[in-house]
Amino acid sequence: DAKTTQPPSMDCAEGRAANLPCNHSTISGNEYVYWYRQIHSQGPQYIIHGLKNNETNEMASLIITEDRKSSTLILPHATLRDTAVYYCIVSSPRAGNNRKLIWGLGTSLAVNP
Amino acid sequence: DSGVTQTPKHLITATGQRVTLRCSPRSGDLSVYWYQQSLDQGLQFLIQYYNGEERAKGNILERFSAQQFPDLHSELNLSSLELGDSALYFCASSVVEYREVPGELFFGEGSRLTVL
């Protein structure tokens, strides 16, 4: 599975958009980009995932560059409750049900009032 | 609430002891994953079970073992505990996976193990 690089920390003002970058320059053609977040030692929470097209759900938007070597998670209107560690992970679906995600240290996002 | 239940939430024990952590996956999920998160570290994948069978192994020590029972709950057994085993242990479950599009993992709230 490809490795990802994320900034260790970011700040964002409440109500503004939070744009979290992720570099995955060694991503291969069948690998998906996943985003999870972890709020203060709670269990990680799934946010969104994508392969090549941009994706949007009720939580966030995922923008993947055309060459797929990087992506950005966008929280459109950050709130204090979005303060968390955000993990960007790439992983390929495997035959059967073997799938393990390799987690880095993520980006610690602080949303400030 | 993810639907994944882990017990106990907190556990304090001494070096050399053995503990068992329990996980009940979401209703209908056949896959269970175990992860370890030490202080200020990312999650380390330990092991995965699918419908009772071991499917993938990560950085799991020989002192650790796991199993998934017919009712799909899983247990992680940690023995000969060392100070360095102090960590958060997370269980996650997922729906039956599609070959082409992987789904998301649903995590429990974790079991915090402290070895003194």
Image (cartoon, helix red, strand yellow):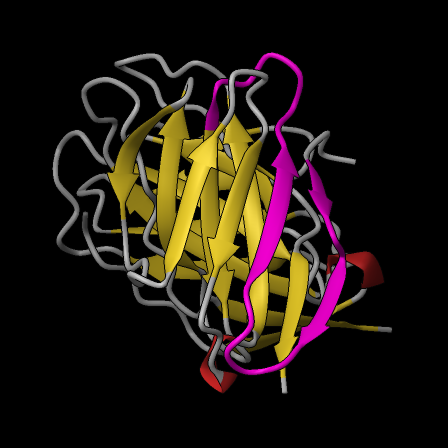
Q: Is residue B106 magenta?
A: no
Q: Quick check: A2 above or below B114?
A: above
Q: Going by the picture, which residue comes out furthest to the right?
A: A113
Q: Quick check: A64 above or below B72?
A: below
Res A58 visible: yes
Task: Give the total of numbered labels.
Answer: 0
Residue A86, percent across and down? 54, 59
Q: Quick check: A21 above or below B38?
A: above
Q: Is residue B9 magenta?
A: yes
Seen at 49% across and 53% down, the residue is: B77
Pick the front one: B97 or B60: B60
Residue A35, percent across and down? 48, 46
Residue B65, percent across and down? 39, 50
Pick the front one: A65 or A82: A82
| Magenta region, residue range | B5-31
Seen at 32% across and 58% down, the residue is: B60
State the image quarter where residue A23 is shown: bottom left
Seen at 63% across and 87% down, the residue is: B116
Q: Is residue A44 left or right of residue B76?
A: right
Pick the front one: B103 or B61: B61
State the image quarter where residue A38 is shown: bottom right
Q: Is residue A1 left or right of residue A21?
A: left
Seen at 61% across and 50% down, the residue is: B21
Res A44 visible: no
